[in-house]
Image: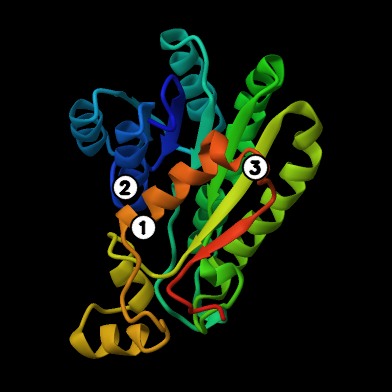
Amino acid sequence: MRLKGKTAIITGGASGFGAGIASSFSKEGAKVIIADINMQNADKIAKKLDGFSIRVDVSNKASVKTAIAETLGKVEKIDILVNNAGITHLPSPMEQVSEEEFDNILAVNTKSVFLTSHYLIPHFKENKSGVILNIASTAGVSPRANLTWYNASKGWMITATKSMAIELAPLGIRANAINPVAGETPLLKSFMGEDTPAMRKKFLATIPIGRFSTPTDIGATATFLCSNEASMITGVALEVDGGRCI
């Protein structure tokens, strides 16, 4: 029960890594808030974990502001923010990615972190405590070709995490990131371009442990980084990648 008494809001918590994090947090005693645009899945996950769901478009200022305000109307305190929501573009030469795709990637993967920080960090400062966990990617450390703008967005998130950690540490607030390798989530097909045995074999060949990451892997790592056991850890971007970045 490493998170007993804690309340965590998880963006993109209705599927994939977000759902894995929510499940792990709940098992360790946390009250989980599933913040997602897909309310059908969010409601289902929240009910299963005895938490609650809230609709949010993480790229939209008004939506994020409303979601945070509504959450704080239901709970006394938020202890943990997990910025997990993310999207990618299909593998393409960088000049062939449309401006619309580029704008969407920046809005969901980077602007979302700015917006959640804008509306939740004052609450953390008021309580002189809080943990921020950003779900970045090995793409921000060891980029794959033809995913340039996605790679760049995750590199931004890693740098933002380190800067947040420096700025917020004196105020009792920690900020860390996790860098998963490609995982068994709805985004896997998008990363690969096509989900075929040959493409999976190609991707797996770059992961020394020989498998994709799972929501359980990321959930376990997130639980540790957001627990008091990691109270001396801030500014870390931890690879959970089976050795891919070595």
Camera-nearest residue between 30 and 121: 30
Q: Residue shown at 53%/69% (left/top)?
A: 138
> Within 10 angstroms of label 1, few (less than 14), some, or many (20 or more) residues?
some
Residue type indicated by callout 2: Gly
Q: Is residue 7 visible?
A: yes
Q: Which residue is mark 1?
A: 217
In the image, is residue 144 above or below residue 102? below
Secondary structure at badge 3 equals strand
Camera-nearest residue between 171 and 66: 171
Earlier along the polypeptide chain: callout 1 or callout 3? 3
- Give residue 88's position: percent from left, percent from top: 44, 63
Residue contact between numbered discs 1 and 2, judged by CB atoms under 8 Å: yes
Q: Which residue is mark 2?
A: 20
Secondary structure at badge 2 equals helix
Tell me the distance, in whole angstroms, between the alpha carbons under discs 3 and 2. 20 Å
Secondary structure at badge 1 equals helix
Camera-nearest residue between 159 and 66: 159
